[in-house]
Each structure stands twice: as structure tokens, then as C-alpha cells.
Image: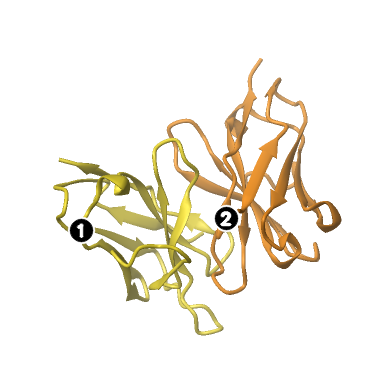
Amino acid sequence: DIVMTQTPLSSPVTLGQPASISCRSSQSLVHSDGNTYLSWLQQRPGQPPRLLIYKISSRFAGVSNRFRGSGAGTDFTLKISRVEADDVGLYYCMQATQFPWTFGQGTRVEIK
Amino acid sequence: EVHLVESGGDLVQPGGSLRLSCAASGFSFGDYATHWVRQAPGKGLEWVAHISWNSNTRLYADSVKGRFTISRDNAKNSLYLQMDSLRAEDTALYSCAASSNSTNSFDYWGQGTVVAVSS
């Protein structure tokens, strides 16, 4: 199974300041079809997860352009340009290149 | 508006069975692959099972293989998970999710239903 490792596990951020979360996979996420199926999910308190970013950097419908994904191979990053109160919650990276699909441990974003 | 609504969670004894259901609305259910994902108390997310849009492909996590069966009925916009030989470690919030070919990710999630396995 592909192991996904996120850092940091907790990220206290000042409102209006940027936040960054890293995700590393135990093997390359490049699929045989040429795509890299790395996604980022947001889980607000009491809510189910919500898709933010898919295929490394594509924003899902309705997602703010404050969220930006980047990376390649085994190293990926989610950046929030200006953190808002609504961004508080858990953020997960996830790979769908190979079954079983696997998740990172989650990074808690909170306001300082 | 997209909705995925799970039901069927309950308290069950070890070795028992449960059948979870997920009712979908607000999107073309038959065009999406669907999954079950679980989250045990205090733990992270774990993918459990996948079924393709036409039911031709069914895949399971090793932890549930041989005990759980995923199925769907596109005419009823519904997804199911038959859970047999339940163990204490199956205790979790079970959520259904839908994935599209364009994202190959979890486009939509339900709120989940709680399964507790205990004597």
C-alpha cells in the first residue's frame, strides 16, 4: 500500500496569513495513464470531507482560488494564500493512483 | 443540490451482520464510481470498498475482504454495503462517496452512519 505522510500535523495560523501543508507518498503517484492522482480534502468540524484539489493542482467546482496545489512524483504541497476563519479544520492528502486509495494522517489548521 | 444519505448503522455484537445503504440525489449517480470509506474513533480515513459505475469492478481493503460486499442499484440511485462477521475493529463512521472519471477522487461525500461492534 502507498503510505501518505503529511507535515505538519498541526498548523496554527494568523487570519489573513498563508498556510502550507506538505504531503509525501512512499512511492511515485504517476499513473500508467500519465496522470498523478493526488487530491486534497478539507473537513470542517462536524462536516464530511470536501474535495478541494484533484490531480495535484486542479481546483474542484466552487473551490476558492486561495487554495493552490502543487508538486510532482512523491512530494506535494497545499497552500492557502490568506487563511480565513472558514478554513479551520482538517486537511487530508489522498492518493488514487493505486488501490487501496490511501490518505495522509490529516493536518489540523487552526487560528492563532 | 447533491445529497448522499447513509443509513443502517447500529450497535451489533461481534460476529454479527449489518447492511448499510446510501441514497444518492442531485447528480447522475449511474455515471459515478462509488465507495465506502470509514473513520474509526480517533483515527484517520480508511478506504473500504469500491464499485464501478456498472458494477463490473468491485475492490476491497484487505481488512474487510471476504467479509464485506459492496453493491449498487442504479435504478434506485443507491449503494449498499453488506457487512458480515463483524469485528470490534470495524467500529467506525461509515460514509459513502462518489468519484468521477474526470477527478478520480471523492467528488461527493455523505455524512456517514455509525457502526459499533461490541458485546
Q: Residue at label 1?
A: A82
Q: Residue at label 2?
A: B108
Q: Residue A88 location in percent, x, y?
A: 30, 44
From this view, report whether residue B106 is shown above or below residue B88.
Answer: below
From this view, report whether residue A26 is shown above or below residue A58.
Answer: above
- The residue positioned 53% from the left and 65% from the top of the image is A96
Marks 1/2: CA distance? 26 Å
Q: Which of B99 and A63 is in front in this view?
A: A63
The chain drawn in orange is B
Quadrant position of residue B8 = top right
- Residue type at mark 1 is Arg
In which chain is the residue bearing label 1?
A
SS for callout 2: strand
SS for callout 1: loop
Find the residue positioned furthest to the top: B119
Find the residue positioned furthest to the right: B75
- The residue positioned 56% from the left and 83% from the top of the image is A33
Find the residue positioned furthest to the front: B1
Q: Residue B38 location in percent, x, y?
A: 57, 42
- Residue type at mark 2 is Tyr
In-image side of B13 versus A59 (left or right)? right
Asked whether the viewer can see residue A74, the reply is: yes
